[in-house]
Image (tube, grey):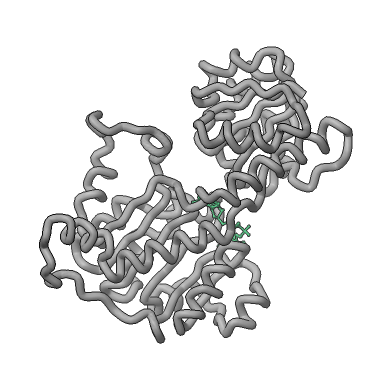
Amino acid sequence: MKVAVFSTKTYDRQFLEAANFPIQHELVFFEPRLNRDTAILAAGFPCVCAFVHDQVDASTLEILAAGGTRLIALRCAGFNNVDLATAAKLGITVVRVPAYSPYGVAEHAVGLILSLNRKIHRAYNRVRESNFSLNGLLGFNLYERTVGIIGTGKIGLILGQIMKGFGCNLLAYDLYKNPDLEALGGKYVELPELFANSDIISLHCPLMPETHHLINSEAIAQMKPGMMIINTSRGALIDTQAVIEGLKSGQIGYLGVDVYEQESELFFEDLSGEIIQDDIFQRLTTFPNVLITGHQAFFTEEALRNIADTTFANIADIEQGRSCANEIRYQPEKALVG
Ligand code: NAD
């Protein structure tokens, strides 16, 4: 099949070409993001391969449909950037890669926890400046601390397993209990109890209307003073302005995020030397107890291999008329956003 691959970075090309070698789809790589202005590039391509920051909105989909596109193969799990209602109306099938790096994301969350707690990001810079003072680097033992996990699916469970290894107590909140998390000793509680008793809160639920700004000023007020928030899920789970207020007052002691509400303007691009216009993001970067990474939690060799293999398996299913387990069906009553 002819596949137009958008938002291509060199690493995407490397892993997609390797996975495509035995299959021989006709891949054409485009560096720009997919949106209404660039969709015309896909004219004549029955399949478009898109990523998290591509804007697969109604107008983009209409241009794609007019150009003959019948399949959107997302090479990511979240699909909050796709207008599924319009895709269904235009007869465009949408498939995704639901799980490609649960270990990678959970391990990255642990990396943020350890770095923030033991101030490794600050120590790294100090030692390079020949400053060996320990002032300001005091951490705490993870042993017997309480970790609150919101969303105990694939990634949340693995985080629970790792933190259990450190000797942490686990609290959990999810719409559905995961028996594997309970088997670890994790205790499901309502959000107020999780907020009040967790030393570390880590977010692993999807972004949906009901989880938008789950961490807001009311939630922060219920938390233990000086606690740590980790978000490797989706930026808009957090009300960034409320978190900034919490950091300024000391109510939040540490913040580690791999995702940010307005990240599509920033992440995955080298903007060094440019003036960043996002004042909220810039304020976040000024706190010594905030660690931000640019949506890299998934970024492991295993994940890029899985993404490529699953994407081509999805395309093969649709091309050969088989049902595809990774097809995202439009469910108006759920109005899922990712
Ligand atoms: P998953 O589907 O296995 O688990 C999500 C869990 O969230 C499920 O148990 C579900 O029941 C729960 N949930 C749904 N609605 C909820 C609600 N209102 N409140 C609490 N829990 C709720 O997904 P996963 O593979 O564990 O991924 C979790 C999230 O991680 C994804 O939604 C995605 O946004 C994010 N992610 C980030 C990266 C990254 O690189 N930073 C990579 C992959 C995934």
Residue drawn at (68%, 34%) of the image: 73
Residue drawn at (53%, 55%) of the image: 210
Q: Quadrant of residue 252?
A: bottom left
* The one of 260 and 86 positioned closer to us in this rendering: 260
Q: Position of residue 280 (x, y in %)?
A: 26, 44
Is 257 rendered above or below residue 307?
below
271 lies left or right of 178 = left
Q: Quadrant of residue 3?
A: top right
The answer to whether residue 240 is seen in the rendering is yes
Q: Position of residue 96 (x, y in %)?
A: 67, 42
The answer to whether residue 212 is seen in the rendering is no
Q: Quadrant of the N terminus?
A: top right
Residue drawn at (62%, 51%) of the image: 100
Is 200 rendered above or below residue 257?
below
Residue drawn at (27%, 33%) of the image: 272
Q: Position of residue 173 (x, y in %)?
A: 54, 71
Q: Position of residue 244 (x, y in %)?
A: 26, 55
